[in-house]
Image (tube, rainbow, N blue to C red):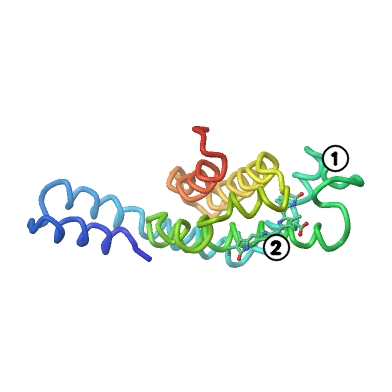
């Protein structure tokens, strides 16, 4: 599991280099967004249950066939599994936001996920919609908490979306 700093050191140590201008620039941009990252994690932590619930409702409104017989959120068990998955995505996104790196997502969330979903028949497209709904909700809340530039929040959510769908969004 890596963050901006351990990742940088790993790369520079791998080639035996001192931290140069590029390294300093990337460290600086990480530190510059540090407070905002903490605000984002705090906001997610304080609102996780309601973000998952609201995002789920919005997803099922946008893709109502998921709830119908034959749909992948039909039956209490599947409905609960879907919201639980949404909760995983949100929680791990909050870790990645603090780390400034998506490595934790690769290691803990995405490894084998597509294959699991495909073998269970869980559709990827609506999952991607759910992740993007949570991203938009988090960005809005973090903006309301006073953070001006919330673009750094895109990274983990877009990373999961991209890796799940294996196509550019
Ligand atoms: C922390 C990393 C991690 C992830 C990401 C994870 C995902 C995950 N989701 C699963 C199931 C599932 N996931 C869904 C999800 C959905 N249904 C829908 O209609 C929507 C499209 C979507 C929600 C957005 C459903 C319905 C199942 C149950 C499928 C089944 O058993 O038929 C399963 C199969 C085992 C189980 O049911 O628990 C895994 C492993 N598990 C993990 O440990």
| The N terminus lies in quadrant | bottom left
**Viewer-side residue, 85 vs 140:** 85
**Viewer-side residue, 144 vs 18:** 18
Residue marked by disc 1? 65
User: Image check: 141 left or right of 82?
Assistant: left
User: Image check: 16 left or right of 72?
Assistant: left
Q: Earlier in the sequence, mark 2 or mark 1?
A: 1
**Viewer-side residue, 120 vs 138:** 120
Q: Residue furthest top?
A: 168
Residue at figure coordinates x 71%, y 50% from the top left: 55
Q: Position of residue 46 (x, y in %)?
A: 61, 67
Q: Residue furthest right?
A: 69
Q: Place residue 37 in its image quadrant.
A: bottom left
Residue marked by disc 2? 84
Residue at figure coordinates x 51%, y 61% from the top left: 94
Within 8 Å: ligand 1 and the Cβ of disc 1? no
Within 8 Å: ligand 1 and the Cβ of disc 2? yes
* Residue 137 disc label: none
Q: Position of residue 167 (x, y in %)?
A: 51, 34
**Viewer-side residue, 76 vs 95:** 76
Helix, strand or loop status at disc 1: helix
User: Image check: 8 left or right of 122?
Assistant: left
Tell me if residue 32 comes above or below residue 62 in the rendering: below
Q: Position of residue 71 (x, y in %)?
A: 84, 45
User: Which quarter is ligand 1 in?
Assistant: bottom right
């Amino acid at each position: 599991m890596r963050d901006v700093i351990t990742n940088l050191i790993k790369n520079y140590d791998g080639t035996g280099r001192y931290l140069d201008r590029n390294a300093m620039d990337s460290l600086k941009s990480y530190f510059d967004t540090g407070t905002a990252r903490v605000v984002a994690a705090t906001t997610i932590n304080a609102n996780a249950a309601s973000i998952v619930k609201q995002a789920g409702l919005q997803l099922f409104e946008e893709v109502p066939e998921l709830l119908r017989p034959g749909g992948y959120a039909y039956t209490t068990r599947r409905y609960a599994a879907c919201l639980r998955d949404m909760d995983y995505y949100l929680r791990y996104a909050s870790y990645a936001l603090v780390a400034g790196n998506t490595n934790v997502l690769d290691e803990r969330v995405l490894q084998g996920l597509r294959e699991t979903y495909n073998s269970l028949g869980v559709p990827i497209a609506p999952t991607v919609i759910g992740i993007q709904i949570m991203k938009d909700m988090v960005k809005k809340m973090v903006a309301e908490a006073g953070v001006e530039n919330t673009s750094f929040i895109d990274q983990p959510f877009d990373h999961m979306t991209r890796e799940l769908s294996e196509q550019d969004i």
